Image (tube, rainbow, N blue to C red):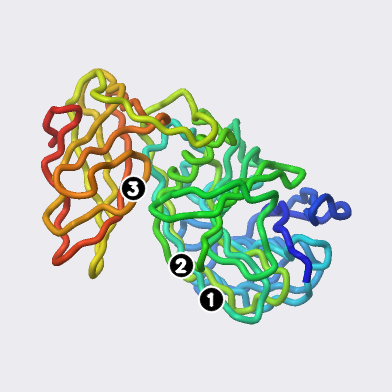
Amino acid sequence: MPTLQRAFRSTRRAVLSAVVALGVIIGGLITLTAAPAAHADTQICDQYGSTTIQGRYVVQNNRWGTTATQCVNVTSTGFQITRADGTATNGGPKSYPSVFYGCHYTNCSPGTNLPAQLSTISSAPTSVSFGYVANAVYDAAYDIWLDPTPRKDGVNKTEIMVWYNQTSPVQPVGSRVGTASVGGRSWDVWTGNNGSNDVISFVAPSPIGTWDFDVKAFANETINRGMAQNSWYLTSVQAGFEPWQNGAGLAVTSFSSSVNIGGGSTTGGTTGGTTGSTTGGTGSASCKVTVTPQSWAGGFTADITVANTGSAAVNGWRLGFTLPSGQRITSAWNADVSPSSGAVTASNLAYNAQIPAGGTQSFGFQGTSSGAFTPPAGFTLNGSSCS
């Protein structure tokens, strides 16, 4: 079977033309009215039908690449594809049934604070759990949409795809350009353009069922690679499937997303994946540190938020702390962290060097633990103690 590349698709999509290079389809926009809020176990078979769950997220059927029937069963926490007729014949997938937070083609999830400028976002924690099947050709993708403007309709400039799973012969748009470590995991990185927007894809080397991460980590990596800027806007995040053949049984069993505003502003990213730290730093070092840990037998993650409670910006930060005995850091995001145990220092990267007065910066790390987990302690910002 030839290689299948995922194609551009939107919340409301009608196929306009033939296949472009590498089998990517360019669609056209149609206008629809959003459906009312869903109750548990609501069926959607309308081609572009959508509804809300938890009073917070939107589930969309989004059958844009085929005329064959597709139905999704909407639950209180996600959805499952219950019918997936037809086979994609033009290179791109049949559809993108998904659940999203934010604004996409004028359809905004209830109470969302998106679009939001990346420079103002301190963190964007999210979680998704996928359920897979064996008799289908598909990818399971988490989409992050970025644009230079706070647009709520139309095509965004850059699409970030986080591929939790894929089946042969599906592959991302463009070509493989290397690897990256983001969110404590290793990824194959692909970049390209589907004829309507730039796409950067982070492909897991093995399937992921459930994972929590910070959307900002992938946005920062995209900025570092020159495919976005910190002045751009996050418009929506989405989790779903792109099926080519079959697909009944695929499910998003849980989804959560929030965007925390109040991060420091910076001047944008650097190209080529360059990172850097600033030794020492300037500005007030009055600070408050919040630790959000998750632990399990033998391991843990810790998300750290550093708040500048002083009256002047901190330009270049080094956060010192002590890791309890038996804990060892194996990976980190949004900071350079060393050494891996004992007295540890986390230093800013090039894109998050400033913490404005009243603002925050966030980073995190994953590690191993022997015995019961205890959070790190003894935080200092540029040598001054934090509360």
Any part of residue 150 in sight: no
Q: Nearer the viewer, mark 2 or mark 3?
A: 3
Q: Which residue is mark 3?
A: 332
- The structure residue drawn at horizontal position 38% and vertical position 30%, both measured from the top left corner, is 276
Q: Nearer the viewer, mark 1 or mark 3?
A: 3
Query: Residue 318: x and y, percent?
Result: 24, 31
Please determine whether, in this image, residue 114 is positioned above or below residue 210: above
Q: CA distance from mark 2 to mark 3?
A: 22 Å
Between residues 293 and 370, which one lies in front from this camera angle? 370
Q: Quadrant of the N terminus?
A: bottom right
Query: Residue 102: x and y, percent?
Result: 53, 47
Earlier sequence position, callout 1 versus callout 3:
1
Q: Quadrant of the C terminus?
A: top left
Q: Which residue is mark 1?
A: 41
Earlier sequence position, callout 2 versus callout 3:
2
> Would residue 309 appear left or right of 182 to someone viewing this image?
left
Q: Residues within 10 Å of mark 1 (few under 14, many from 20)?
A: some
- The structure residue drawn at horizontal position 30% and vertical position 50%, both measured from the top left corner, is 365
Query: Residue 279: x and y, percent?
Result: 27, 25
Please determine whether, in this image, residue 249 is positioned above or below residue 261: below
Between residues 114 and 370, which one lies in front from this camera angle? 370
Secondary structure found at label 2:
strand
- The structure residue drawn at horizontal position 43% and vertical position 66%, both measured from the top left corner, is 210
- The structure residue drawn at horizontal position 25% and vertical position 34%, both measured from the top left corner, is 307
Secondary structure found at label 3:
strand
Q: Which residue is mark 2?
A: 129
Q: State the image quarter where residue 265 is shown.
A: top left
Q: State the image quarter where residue 379 is shown.
A: top left
